[in-house]
Image (cartoon, rainbow, N blue to C red):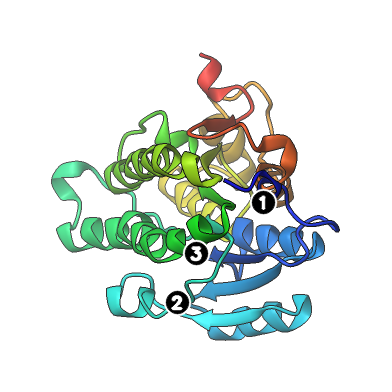
């Protein structure tokens, strides 16, 4: 195998193409911006047409407005990505015995099946050139469970398994696959959870963050999307070429318990 292909070209990620799902907001947006700043061309994949188009224009990327719950739409995405960041996700909170089955299935399609479909179509390109980076934005819930989040916890555990399998299969071809496992990140998804829990518990939103969300973390603050993006970017650097099949907790000490 050509070992020179193990290193990104001069200029960081210039000459590389990244595909980021859920790229119009939150962690995905931060990842798209960081990868573009490092020189990569970015496919901005999101359901929100306006924000996706605006971001793509700003970072000189290409917007792909796709519903990741639609297999045919997922299979229409480009196959020439050197870097894939599987980030898109959604949440629903309910006890298992009250959880809507259709909502459970939707979350698995978006957060497990779509990453699988994207990777099965992009890995041949990575294998052919002897270099590729798969960064799966998992969660502390890929390592730990929480009550009332059965679909999300199941999906993140599934993504962890997919990531490790790709790591084993991709290693002979210069492809690494890793998970980033953040705790609560300051994203629109989390902001909505804060508001909902504030109403449900009858307490101020600041108290929701301190008493409920950060209860199990040692570092008592939310993570910023940019912090997650910088770890994702580092995983695409030459310094991380020996790191694969890993799950990297960015959780303020949550999993140290």
Q: Name the front one of labels 3 and 1.
A: 1
Q: Is residue 83 visible?
A: yes
Q: Are marks 1 and 2 in contact (CB under 8 Å)?
A: no
Going by the image, does 174 lie left or right of 234? Answer: left
Query: Dot 2: few (<14), some (14–19), or many (≥20) neighbours within 10 Å?
Result: some
Question: Which x, y percent locates residue 144?
Answer: 40, 28
Pick whichever of labels 3 and 1 is earlier in the sequence: 1
What SS does tag 2 mark?
loop
Picture residue at 76% right of the left edge, 75% below the top: 59
Looking at the image, which is closer to me, 230 or 163?
163
Query: Dot 3: few (<14), some (14–19), or many (≥20) neighbours within 10 Å?
Result: some
Question: Which x, y percent locates residue 207?
Answer: 60, 37
What SS does tag 1 mark?
helix
Vertical placement of residue 138 versus 140, above or below: below
Alpha-carbon distance for marks 1 and 2? 25 Å
Q: Which residue is mark 2?
A: 77
Pick whichever of labels 1 and 2 is earlier in the sequence: 1
Alpha-carbon distance for marks 3 and 2? 13 Å
Q: Which residue is mark 1?
A: 5
Q: Is residue 138 visible?
A: no
Q: Name the front one of labels 3 and 2.
A: 3
Picture residue at 80% right of the left edge, 59% below the top: 38
Quarter of the picture containing the N terminus is top right
Q: Which residue is mark 3?
A: 125
Asked where in the image residue 30 lies, by quadrant, the reply is: bottom right
């Amino acid at each position: 195998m050509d070992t020179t292909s193990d290193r990104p070209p001069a200029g960081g990620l210039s000459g590389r193409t990244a595909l980021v799902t859920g790229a119009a907001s939150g962690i995905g947006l931060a990842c798209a911006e960081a990868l573009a700043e490092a020189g990569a061309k970015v496919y901005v994949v999101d359901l929100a047409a306006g924000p996706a188009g605006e971001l793509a224009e700003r970072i000189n990327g290409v917007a792909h407005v796709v519903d990741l719950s639609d297999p045919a739409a997922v299979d229409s995405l480009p196959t020439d990505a050197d870097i894939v960041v599987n980030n898109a996700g959604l949440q629903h909170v309910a006890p298992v015995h009250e959880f809507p089955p259709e909502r459970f299935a939707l979350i698995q399609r978006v957060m497990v099946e779509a990453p699988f479909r994207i990777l099965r179509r992009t890995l041949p390109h990575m294998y052919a050139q002897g270099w590729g980076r798969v960064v799966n934005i998992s969660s502390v819930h890929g390592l730990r469970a929480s009550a009332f989040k059965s679909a999300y916890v199941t999906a993140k555990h599934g993504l962890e398994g997919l990531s490790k399998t790709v790591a084993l299969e991709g290693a002979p071809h210069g492809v690494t696959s890793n998970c980033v496992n953040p705790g609560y990140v300051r994203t629109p998804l989390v902001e909505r959870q804060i508001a909902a829990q504030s109403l449900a518990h009858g307490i101020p939103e600041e108290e929701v963050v301190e008493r409920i969300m950060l209860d199990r973390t040692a570092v008592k603050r939310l993570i910023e999307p940019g912090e997650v993006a910088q770890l994702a970017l580092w995983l695409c650097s030459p310094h991380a070429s020996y790191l694969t099949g890993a799950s990297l907790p960015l959780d303020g000490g949550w999993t140290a318990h």
